[in-house]
Image (cartoon, grey):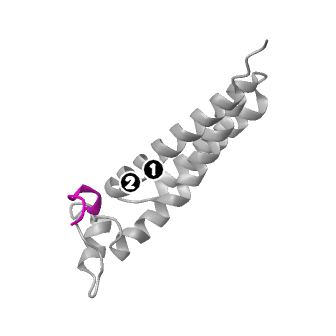
Amino acid sequence: MNINFLGLIAASSAFLGIWLGHVSVRVIERNAKTLWQPIVIAIALGLALETFSLFTNYQLLSTAFGIIGITVIWDAFELVRQEKRVEKGHAPANPSNPRHARILAEPGSQATTVDLLKREPGR
C-alpha cells in the first residue's frame, strides 16, 4: 500500500499560507509607510514561488510552492483592500503611521483606532 501525502501537503500549505497571509497583511498594512514596496515584494515572491512550482520535479514540493505562491500574490491585493477597511473603520488605524494619520485627520473619516478583535465577547 502506498501512502499519498499530496492531500496533506495541499491542505497544510493552504492553511499555513492563508493564516500567515492574514496575519502578515494586517501587520504590514498597519506599519508600512507606503504600500507599493510590500505589494511589489509580495508579487515578486509569489511569482518566484510559482516558477519554482513549475520547474521542480518533486510533486509535493511543487504543490506546496504553487499554493503558497498564489496565496502570496493574493496577499498583495489584500494589502490595498486592508487599507480600504481602515478607511471605513472596519480595521484599526495606526496613528503613528503617516498614511493612517492622514486618514484619521480627514473630515468625516470613519477610521478608528479601536481594534474590534481585541474586545471582550458580547461588547
Q: Residue at x 24, y 59 (%)?
A: 121
Relative to 74, does residue 113 appear above or below in the rendering? below
Please say whether residue 118 is one of the residues in the magenta stretch: yes
Pinpoint residue 77: horizontal percent, then vertical percent. 55, 60
Q: Position of residue 14 (x, y in %)?
A: 59, 40
The residue at 64%/29% (across/down) is 9
Closer-to-camera residue (3/23): 3
Asked whether, in this view, residue 80 is left or right of residue 7, the answer is: left
Element on which disc 1 rests: helix
Above or below 90: residue 27: above
Residue occupying the point 21% across, 65% down: 95
SS assignment for the magenta stretch, majority: loop
Q: Disc 2 marks which amino acid?
A: Arg
Q: Pointer 2: what residue?
A: 26
Give the mark count: 2
CA neighbours of label 2 inside 10 A, class few (<14), some (14 to 19), many (20+): some
Give coordinates of residue 63: x percent, y percent: 70, 33
Callout 2 secondary element = helix
Give percent across and percent down for residue 45: 58, 41
Magenta range is: 115-123
| Residue tagged 1 | 22
Residues at discs 2 and 1 in contact (Cβ within 8 Å)? yes
